[in-house]
Image (cartoon, rainbow, N blue to C red):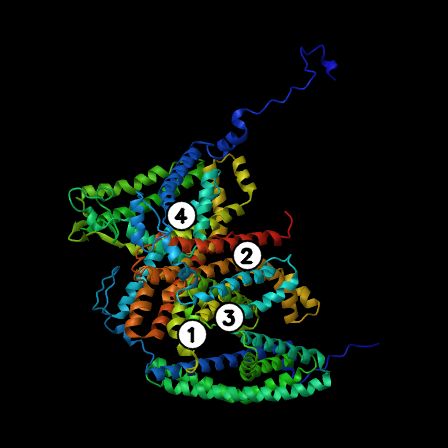
């Protein structure tokens, strides 16, 4: 009779670091660590030597120095006396503005185009396919430049609005002026009591929310279908208009008017912002359209047929059955498209819109000569923006995910 | 059967009714139009709206295109020609004729060398064919492997012997690898391994010693002013001490590891061939090609990198960066899947960093920053630096695509490979990657198309690619100022043709590779 002897305990040998899988990964990582440190030593040594040779040092003091350049689009107050740091903040806000606007419009364009690509109408389907292919296969920089030159050449100059018989006219009861320098919109003037109107507005939004919840409860508990669309619309506008009338129009509008060579007053949206915004939305919209199409196609036909068998109308099938399921497929690529818009907004520099790249990575870099500091800070800003967008959208994605057992 | 009902039914048809044609509204083109264009009120409105858009677009664009002037020397002349002909609107395509060379080849490439670019482009199609279409004979891949050397010579010029010598040295290095790993008997290999182990160990220890000194140098130049500097000073000193302590043990250990691999020969043959290749490139390359060139001179006019431009530059960057970034992307993806925390961490940080910043900031790095990180004596020109940064950029994206492919493989494939006794390299090479890459091909092609489009961004750091040519020399010239549509339209058309063909190829390939049955 044989008994299994305990395997004799091996003492540690140097070759086990290489041949024993228990230790090998540690060995590899140790070697990798040494290699990383050696690379850092190489790069850092070069950096120190090159900086010493050029008589430079790494310092972020320049952010506190006077910038001395003007920025044409300022969401916060800024003039050339302010610091480089404040200029960078203005640029950051400009980046966020164009990225935010772009995300909203690109989503709208993309969803519409994506749904229309699956339309039973042959002509519409083909036009949308044409749109998607044309925009997806040409660089966004070329689109930005094309749309910018449309803005400059096709829109009338402010001069055209002058005189007794102007060649151009303003839109919407003389409130919006589209010129080749930009678009001028009416600006709200917050008079006394405007806080009350805003309060009424917020209250009516909460009211709509509660009303919808009530309608939903009625539907689920008693099977009564209460129309929500028109009452919500009424609830949104009527109280605010009433409050405006009762309080004597506390919120008034300042209209842009032609003074001197240009329009004054109102809100100015620069042509470069509009060109960039429009180009980014229509370019990214083509990609989103493809995602939306893929998402809708991913919902199996049986779902549509089952919904139809239950007696739902086509619009309700889309809203209640297909889109909620398609959304799970659409959202992850949508997040990366939003990130793409944010990153592509850095092409603003090509049309002279002063975003983060234009201020910090453009004029500040050239004026101060602080190349390394500026570029590193620029990357850090973009990294923070990208990471926070993907963080927020991932939370949203997790709430939308199918709850599986 | 009809006779059974003969009494109860008044009339029974005994013959078939001849088939009648379908109603006019339910057949042919009419039916198609009814079903596809006017199948309801909503659809009819949509169709009319779409027709209106198409017609307006055609009315706007067609005369402009049709009246286009192809022969003129300036925009003013174009307008004059149009006015004389009494045409209201018309394109000025003359700019394309006049500046064709600039748009395609850039404005500095010697005109007598244009054939070289065209030939390189045609050969690119030939070289790419066997990689793209698996039905072509595999022997053509030999040409694909040879193509980069040929293309380098054609585009950059100089002596043919330089790329040929490089090719020869690479082949020699591979032969060294083959020789050591399979030709030398184990007893002799033990001696070879010992020698190479000693050389490499000593070399590594020396390099690490230099690195440690460098770290001390960095720490001292950082100084101790301010909190951040103090922290950096401390970190660099810790790293320096770490390197000082471990330089000799690391050298001994790596030397021993190389010696220890004499039995299977894997590590020692890799290290020996790398060592051979390095020495050969440093000490043999220039004497050999210069000697060969002095015996039989085969030379083309040399063209500097900064003289490349136009659409050619976009093609050049696109091709080079995509082909370089695929292997790098595979390595990054494998690194991200690795169970080793350090390697995984490095890959994750690299990938997420690159994916979080816009390409334009990386091009700024190439333009103004990268030179600070390279040795003072080295002079990498701007194109090379841009190639490095774009390659890193697309490698991060490709790594994510391949990671998706790796994650999509069933776990059974990994386990099956393990149970066959394959080691990590074999399993990855033979089982995992072929399947993972197949899944990720459409994604890789998407990245490649995106990257090719993104090469236009180099115009922002004032390089003269297609967009840079248009924005710079053409629109700033006195003859062609304020010409927009024609040039941008042309640029858009060129990119569209290339990108659309690639994406069509990708869709075709997807259908080919789809081995599942529906």
Q: For the residue labelled by badge 2, is the local secondary structure a helix, a strand or a loop?
A: helix
Mark 1 or mark 2, earlier in chain? 1
Q: Quadrant of the N terminus of chain B?
A: top right
Circle 3 Cα neighbour tier, 10 Å, few/some/many (<14 / 14–19 / ≥20): many
- Residue B410 visible? The answer is yes
Secondary structure state at the residue bearing disc 1? loop
Q: Nearer the viewer, residue A219 or A102?
A: A102
The quarter holding residue B455 reads bottom left
Around disc 1, counting alpha carbons within 10 Å, would you say few (fewer than 14), some (14 to 19), or many (20 or more)?
A: some
Residue at image mark 3? B347
Picture quarter containing residue A148? bottom left
Q: Secondary structure at mark 3?
A: helix
Identify the image quadrant of residue B431: bottom right
As drawn, B471 above or below B189: above
Q: Nearer the viewer, mark 3 or mark 1?
A: 1
Instruction: Provide residue B508's location: percent of width, then percent of height.
Output: 57, 52
Same-chain check, marks 1 and 2:
yes
Q: Residues within 10 Å of mark 2 (few under 14, many from 20)?
A: some
Residue at the disc numbered 1: B381
Q: Using the image, name the chain to which the residue with label 4 belongs.
A: A
Residue that mark 2 sits on: B442
Query: Circle 4 is placed at which residue position?
Result: A109
Residue B212 lies, in percent from the top left, at 47, 87
Give the Cα separation between the discs numbered 2 and 4: 25 Å
Which is more foreground, mark 2 or mark 4?
Answer: 2
Is disc 4 on the same chain as disc 1? no
Q: Earlier in the sequence, mark 3 or mark 1?
A: 3
Residue A166 horizontal side relative to residue B331, left or right: left
- Within 10 Å of disc 4 (Cα), the crowding (few <14, some 14-19, many 20+) is some
Earlier sequence position, callout 2 versus callout 3: 3
């Amino acid at each position: 009779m044989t008994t299994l002897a305990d395997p004799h305990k091996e003492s540690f040998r140097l070759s086990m670091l290489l041949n024993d899988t228990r230790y090998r990964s540690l060995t590899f990582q140790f070697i990798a660590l040494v290699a990383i440190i050696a690379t850092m030593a190489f790069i850092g040594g070069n950096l120190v030597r090159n900086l010493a040779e050029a008589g430079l040092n790494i310092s972020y003091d320049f952010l506190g120095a006077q910038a001395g350049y003007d920025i044409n689009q300022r969401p916060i107050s800024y003039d050339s006396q302010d610091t480089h740091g404040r200029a960078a903040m203005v640029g950051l806000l400009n980046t966020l503005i164009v990225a935010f606007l772009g995300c909203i419009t690109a989503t709208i364009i993309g969803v519409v185009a994506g749904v229309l690509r699956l339309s039973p109408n042959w002509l519409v389907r083909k036009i949308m396919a044409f749109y998607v292919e044309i925009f997806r296969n040409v660089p966004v920089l070329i689109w930005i430049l094309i749309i910018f030159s449309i803005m400059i050449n096709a829109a009338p100059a402010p001069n055209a609005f002058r005189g007794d018989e102007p060649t151009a006219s303003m839109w919407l009861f003389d409130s919006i002026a589209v010129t080749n320098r930009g678009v001028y919109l009416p600006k709200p003037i917050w008079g006394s009591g405007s806080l009350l109107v805003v309060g009424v507005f917020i209250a009516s939004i909460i009211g709509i929310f509660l009303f919808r919840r009530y309608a939903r409860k009625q539907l689920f508990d008693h099977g009564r279908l209460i129309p929500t669309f028109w009452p919500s619309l009424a609830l949104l506008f009527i109280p605010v208009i009433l409050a405006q009338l009762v309080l004597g129009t506390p919120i008034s509008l300042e209209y842009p008017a032609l003074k001197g060579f240009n329009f004054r007053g109102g809100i100015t949206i620069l042509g470069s912002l509009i060109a960039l915004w429009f180009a980014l939305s229509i370019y990214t919209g083509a990609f989103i359209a493809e995602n939306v199409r893929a998402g809708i196609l991913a919902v199996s036909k049986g779902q549509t047929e089952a919904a139809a068998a239950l007696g739902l109308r086509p619009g309700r099938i889309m809203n209640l059955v297909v889109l909620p399921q398609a959304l799970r497929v659409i959202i992850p690529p949508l997040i990366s498209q939003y990130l793409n818009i944010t990153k592509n907004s850095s092409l603003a520099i090509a049309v002279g819109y002063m975003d983060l790249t234009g201020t910090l990575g453009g004029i500040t870099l050239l004026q101060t000569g602080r190349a390394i500091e500026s570029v590193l800070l620029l990357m850090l800003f973009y990294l923070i923006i990208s990471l926070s967008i993907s963080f927020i959208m991932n939370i949203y994605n997790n709430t939308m995910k199918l709850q599986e057992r | 059967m009809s006779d059974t009902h003969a009494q109860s039914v008044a009339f029974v048809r005994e013959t078939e009714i001849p088939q009648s044609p379908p109603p006019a509204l339910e057949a042919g083109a009419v039916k198609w139009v009814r079903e596809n264009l006017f199948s309801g009120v909503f659809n009819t409105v949509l169709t009319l709206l779409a027709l209106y858009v198409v017609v307006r677009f055609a009315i706007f664009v067609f005369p402009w295109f049709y009246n286009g002037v192809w022969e003129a020397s300036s925009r003013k002349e174009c307008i004059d020609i149009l006015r004389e002909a009494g045409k209201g609107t018309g394109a000025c395509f003359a700019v394309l004729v006049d500046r064709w060379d600039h748009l395609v080849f850039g404005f500095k490439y010697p005109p007598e060398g244009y054939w070289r670019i065209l030939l390189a482009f045609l050969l690119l199609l030939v070289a790419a064919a066997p990689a793209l279409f698996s039905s072509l004979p595999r022997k053509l891949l030999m040409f694909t492997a040879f193509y980069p050397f040929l293309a380098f010579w054609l585009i950059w010029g100089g002596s043919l012997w330089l790329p040929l010598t490089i090719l020869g040295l690479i082949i020699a290095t591979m032969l060294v690898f083959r020789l050591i790993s399979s030709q030398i008997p184990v007893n002799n290999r033990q001696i070879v391994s010992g020698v190479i182990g000693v050389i490499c160990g000593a070399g590594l220890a020396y390099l690490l010693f230099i690195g440690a000194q460098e770290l001390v140098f960095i720490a001292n130049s950082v100084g101790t002013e301010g909190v951040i500097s103090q922290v950096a000073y401390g970190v660099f000193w810790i790293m320096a001490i770490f390197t000082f302590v471990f330089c000799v043990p690391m050298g001994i250990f790596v030397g021993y590891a190389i010696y220890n691999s004499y039995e299977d020969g894997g590590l020692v043959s890799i290290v020996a061939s790398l060592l051979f290749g390095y020495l050969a490139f440093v000490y043999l390359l220039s004497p050999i090609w210069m000697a060969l060139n002095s015996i039989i001179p085969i030379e083309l006019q040399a063209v500097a990198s900064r003289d490349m431009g136009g659409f050619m530059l976009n093609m050049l960057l696109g091709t080079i960066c995509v082909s370089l970034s695929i292997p790098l992307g595979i390595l990054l993806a494998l690194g991200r899947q690795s169970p080793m925390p350090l390697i995984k961490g490095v890959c994750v940080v690299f990938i997420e960093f690159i994916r979080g910043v816009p390409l334009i900031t990386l091009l700024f790095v190439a333009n103004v920053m990268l030179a600070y990180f390279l040795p003072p004596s080295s002079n990498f020109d701007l194109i090379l630096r841009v190639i490095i940064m774009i390659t890193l950029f697309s490698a991060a994206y490709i790594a994510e695509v391949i990671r998706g492919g790796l994650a999509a493989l069933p776990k059974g494939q990994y386990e099956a490979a393990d149970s066959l006794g394959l080691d990590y390299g074999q399993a990855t090479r033979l089982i995992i990657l072929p399947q993972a890459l197949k899944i990720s091909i459409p994604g890789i092609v998407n990245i490649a198309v995106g990257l090719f489009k993104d090469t236009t961004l180099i115009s922002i750091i004032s390089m003269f690619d297609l967009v840079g040519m248009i924005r710079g020399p053409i629109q700033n010239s006195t003859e062609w100022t304020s010409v927009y549509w024609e040039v941008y339209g042309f640029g858009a058309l060129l990119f569209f043709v290339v990108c659309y063909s690639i994406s069509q190829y990708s869709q075709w390939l997807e259908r080919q590779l789809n081995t599942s049955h529906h």
